[in-house]
Image (spheres, coloured by chain):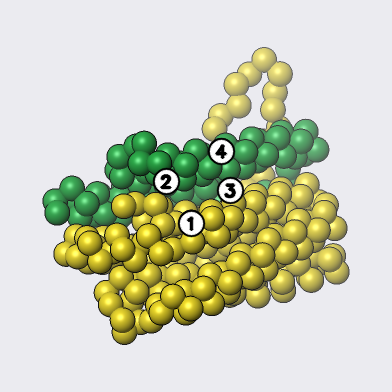
Amino acid sequence: MDSSTFATRPLALPAARPGRRRAAVREPLPGDLAIWFFIAAELAVFGVLFAAYAFARRAEPGLFAAGQAQLPLGIALANTLALLTSSFAVARAVESVRADRARACARWLGAALALGLGFVALKLVEFDRDAAHGFSLSRNLFDMFYLSLTVFHFMHVLMGMLILGFVAIKAARGGYSARAHAGVESAASYWHMVDLLWIVLFALVYLLH
Amino acid sequence: MTPISRVGAFAARHRLSAVWGLLCALTLAGTQAARLGAVPALAVLALALAKAQIVADQFMGLRRVHALWRFLMLLYLSGVGALVAYAFISR
């Protein structure tokens, strides 16, 4: 493992020479190294929760199947598509700022925020529906896991939107450039983590019967 | 924080659009298959983990960095997937 493994400084790409294959150039991790420690910690926590859910389900499959049957699959699917699309928008924002198009970066971040808002709105509709169906943390094991996982993830979405909002405002004010945009990459990495976790959560809680 | 050229940005736009389309298509197909019970639970789980790895590689940008980071993400997803799969098949 060489020192470039943990490098976070800018890395100049060598110019391509006609007729010669360019050696594979590895870039440093996108964003600040600190955000990756944070992401690793979050992934570990959710990993434990996912495993705990699966083993709790093994203990009471009937209870979990009955609980899953009450969940609104359509809303969850729409939320999955919203987060995937917002993640795409954030990736486009990063590519825009890397090409020195800060305004386009701000617009893509705005689009990602709008999709995040859509996720939040749909999730609130789902939580309201859950309450009407009598879901509560103390009712049974499935409710406890379902609400804990989804509310915990929901809080991460809100945090991600806050971060994206700050970065979008700074991008709109010309605060980032092709040479200096670690803030955009850090925010993007966090948001992709939120998306990645939802993909697993959606399959585990809504699809796996 | 590596800058990219206009040509590079053009290629990246198309690549990201293709990845987004693939992820949406896999989500819709996987959800429909799971809803109809057409595929085993483990296949649904494997598809979700594959989508998560695609997000990490293509959107997060791990495909451009040192292979160690990509391996660690693969290790994480495989570990979580193995635990969940074990809980499902050992009941």
Residue at 67%, 68% (x, y): give it: A117
Label 3 sits on a secondary structure element that is: helix
- Chain in yellow, by letter, is A
- Pointer 2 residue: B35
Frontmost of labels 4 and 2 is 2
Which chain does the residue under circle 3 lie in? B
Marks 4 & 2 on one chain: yes
Q: Amino acid at mark 1?
A: Leu
View extreme (front): residue? A133
Earlier sequence position, callout 3 versus callout 4: 4
Frontmost of labels 4 and 1 is 1
Mark 1 and mark 3: span between their CA atoms?
25 Å
A59 displayed left or right of A122 = left
- Chain in green, by letter, is B
- Considering only vertical position in the picture, is B10 above or below A145? above
Residue A137 percent location from the top left of the image = 35, 82
Residue at 40%, 41% (x, y): give it: B36
Residue B4 percent location from the top left of the image = 73, 42
- Pointer 1 residue: A73
Label 1 sits on a secondary structure element that is: helix
Which chain does the residue under circle 2 lie in? B
Mark 4 and mark 1: span between their CA atoms?
17 Å
- Considering only vertical position in the picture, is A203 above or below B15? below
- Pointer 4 residue: B25
Residue at 59%, 55% (x, y): give it: A78
Query: Is the Cβ of the residue at disc 4 closer than 8 Å to that at disc 2?
Result: no
View extreme (bottom): residue? A138
Query: Is the Cβ of the residue at disc 1 closer than 8 Å to that at disc 2?
Result: yes
Residue B85 percent location from the top left of the image = 24, 49
Label 4 sits on a secondary structure element that is: helix
Marks 1 & 2 on one chain: no
- Considering only vertical position in the picture, is A126 above or below B30? below
